[in-house]
Image (spheres, rainbow, N blue to C red):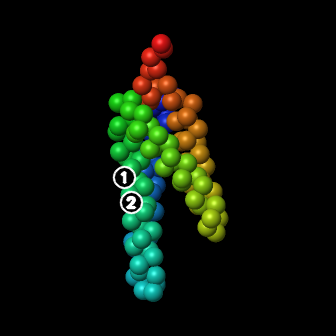
C-alpha cells in the first residue's frame, strides 16, 4: 500500500507539471493575464516539485517529509473549492484525496517507529 501512495504522489506531481506547462502556453492568448498565469504556473511547479521531493524522500522515514507531503496533498484537496469547480478540478481533487488517504493509512511505512518507554 505504501508503494501505491508513493506512485499516486508521483502521478500528482506529473499532473501539476503538465498543468503548469499548459498554463505557461496560455500566456500568449491573453496578454492582460500574463502575471496571473505566470504566478499560477509557478505555484503548480513548486507544488509538483515538493511532491516529487516527497516521492523520493518518503522512504527515509522522516517525519517532517511525511507531514510536508501530507499538508501539500491536503492543500491540493481544499484549494480548488475556492475556484470555479469543473470536471478537471474534481478529478484533480479526487487524485489528491486518494493519495492523501492512502498515504495516511500507510503512515507506519513512512514514519519512524515509536520507541515505547
Dot 1 alpha-carbon crowd within 10 angstroms: few under 14, some 14 to 19, many 20 or more? some
Left or right: where 105 falls relative to 65: right
Above or below for 71 versus 5: below
Q: Quadrant of residue 19?
A: bottom left
* Residue beneath the point at 55% across and 48% down: 74
Q: Position of residue 81 (x, y in %)?
A: 64, 61
Q: Which residue occupies the foreground of this view, 90 or 35?
A: 35
Q: Residue furthest top?
A: 117
The residue labelled by disc 1 is 49
Dot 2 alpha-carbon crowd within 10 angstroms: few under 14, some 14 to 19, many 20 or more? many
| Label disc, if present, on residue 81 of the rendered structure | none
| Label disc, if present, on residue 45 of the rendered structure | 2
Can the viewer see residue 86 in this picture? no
Q: Which residue occupies the foreground of this view, 16 or 79?
A: 79
Q: Quadrant of residue 80?
A: bottom right
Q: Secondary structure at mark 2?
A: helix
Q: Residue furthest front?
A: 117
Above or below for 83 versus 91: below
* Residue beneath the point at 42% across and 34% down: 63
Can the viewer see residue 37 in this picture? yes
Q: Position of residue 41 (x, y in %)?
A: 41, 67
* Residue beneath the point at 40% across and 73% down: 38
- Does the residue at mark 2 contact the one at mark 1 (Cβ under 8 Å)? yes
Q: Which residue occupies the foreground of this view, 69 or 1?
A: 69
* Residue beneath the point at 44% across and 29% down: 110
Q: Position of residue 43 (x, y in %)?
A: 42, 63
Amino acid at each position: 500500500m505504501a508503494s501505491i501512495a508513493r506512485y499516486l504522489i508521483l502521478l500528482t506531481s506529473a499532473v501539476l507539471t503538465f498543468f503548469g506547462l499548459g498554463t505557461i502556453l496560455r500566456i500568449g492568448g491573453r496578454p492582460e493575464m500574463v502575471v496571473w498565469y505566470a504566478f499560477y504556473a509557478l505555484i503548480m511547479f513548486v507544488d509538483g516539485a515538493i511532491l516529487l521531493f516527497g516521492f523520493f524522500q518518503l522512504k527515509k522515514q522522516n517525519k517532517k517529509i511525511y507531514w510536508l507531503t501530507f499538508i501539500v496533498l491536503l492543500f491540493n484537496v481544499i484549494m480548488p473549492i475556492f475556484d470555479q469547480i469543473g470536471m478537471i478540478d474534481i478529478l484533480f481533487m479526487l487524485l489528491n484525496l486518494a493519495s492523501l488517504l492512502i498515504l495516511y493509512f500507510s503512515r507506519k511505512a513512512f514514519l519512524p517507529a515509536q520507541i515505547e518507554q
